[in-house]
Image (tube, rainbow, N blue to C red):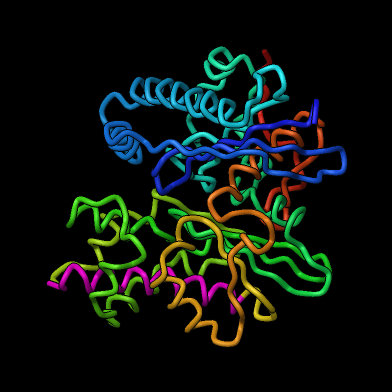
Amino acid sequence: MAGNLFIGLMSGTSLDGVDAALVSIDKEDNIALIEQHFIAYPAELRAEILLLQHPTLNELEATALIANKLSHLYAQVIEQLLHKAHTKVHEIVAIGAHGQTIRHRPELGFTLQICNAALLTELTGINVVSDFRSRDVAAGGQGAPLVPAFHQAVFADHTQNRAIINIGGIANITYLGKSGEVFGFDSGPGNMLLDAWISHHLGLGYDENGAWAGTGNVIQPLLASMLEDDYFAKPIPKSTGRDLFNLPWLNQHLLKHHYAPCDVARTLVALTAHSIHEAVNEHGADTDEIYLCGGGEKNGLLKYELQRLFKNTPIYSTEVLGIGVDWVEAIAFAWLAKKCLAREPASLSAVTGAKGARILGAIYQV
């Protein structure tokens, strides 16, 4: 495995923590997961990151300081990952570090994922590839989602039309046609709104297995109101994030209404499921099978709702394709780091809308 080992780091819009994957990737891009590790965000750090999602006082300094904190946390998770895998620093070719998304405004020509990659290189003694999205945005693209290219490499099948649906804070869909057609986009909120709602009302980080939402009932007028948001009708390619879907957005739909909090929670589960279902029906109606990954795959209520809507289309976990639901994106950024170092384009213009495929990432060498 010498010269084939990469580490992928992913901290997504759910803001739960850092996923780290140690993988072997050979010259033919065959991928093997060696070890994985997760560190949860300390509550204070998570709160600081949430404050940065919108303009705030002294945010330039705050952003730089939080990027440093994140880099120290990334270094910690890497140290623990390598210890678990009995692997030495010098055996790792590079780290692919997505960073933490703070703003995503491709319509204004920028996207911001914070990570002090230079500091991470110093802390680990390993080459770091980061800032994967900016080049695609500079080329007129959305800069997201980036993982569909990886999905194509590892999940495509010439006998079935597949949809890979990652349900993190945001839900994104990759369509993998059996003829080779690939496209992807963000369908809308995944766990983000429900996490924010349960945190506000119960002080919990997430609704485990949809237990709280399961005590409520869908508020049909609220669901209809939320689904009328312009984002859902926008043509693809498109991407979104906390800049749009957040508690203030939800509260606008709750004005002058006094719904039971558990009913709102149940309706948010329905929002995620319905927006995914409508997106797949509109853009991939010939989908033969669906594979879920991300934290939302563990929400039994959400999975039930999705299967109810999709009826005869079978829904599986990416686990059956060989990659666990928690590790798809971390492995993807290890793969993207390898592509960058090899000077190989790794974006799909059909997904992001960029003028063409681009080499993604900025390299910080030891």
Q: Residue furthest right?
A: 28
Residue 325 among magenta residues: no
**Residue 41 percent across, percent down from the top left:** 37, 36
Characterize the magenta stretch by its predominant secondary structure.
Answer: helix
The C terminus sits in image quarter: top right
Choose between 158 and 113: the one closer to the eye: 158
Instruction: Give the quadrant of residue 192.
Output: bottom left
Q: Residue at x 56, y 36 (%)?
A: 9
Above or below: residue 121 compared with residue 282: above
Instruction: Give the quadrant of residue 4.
Output: top right
The N terminus sits in image quarter: top right
Instruction: Give the quadrant of residue 201.
Output: bottom left
Residue 265 among magenta residues: yes
Above or below: residue 266 compared with residue 81: below
**Residue 267 percent across, percent down from the top left:** 31, 73
**Residue 193 percent across, percent down from the top left:** 33, 58
Q: Which residues are magenta?
A: 258-282
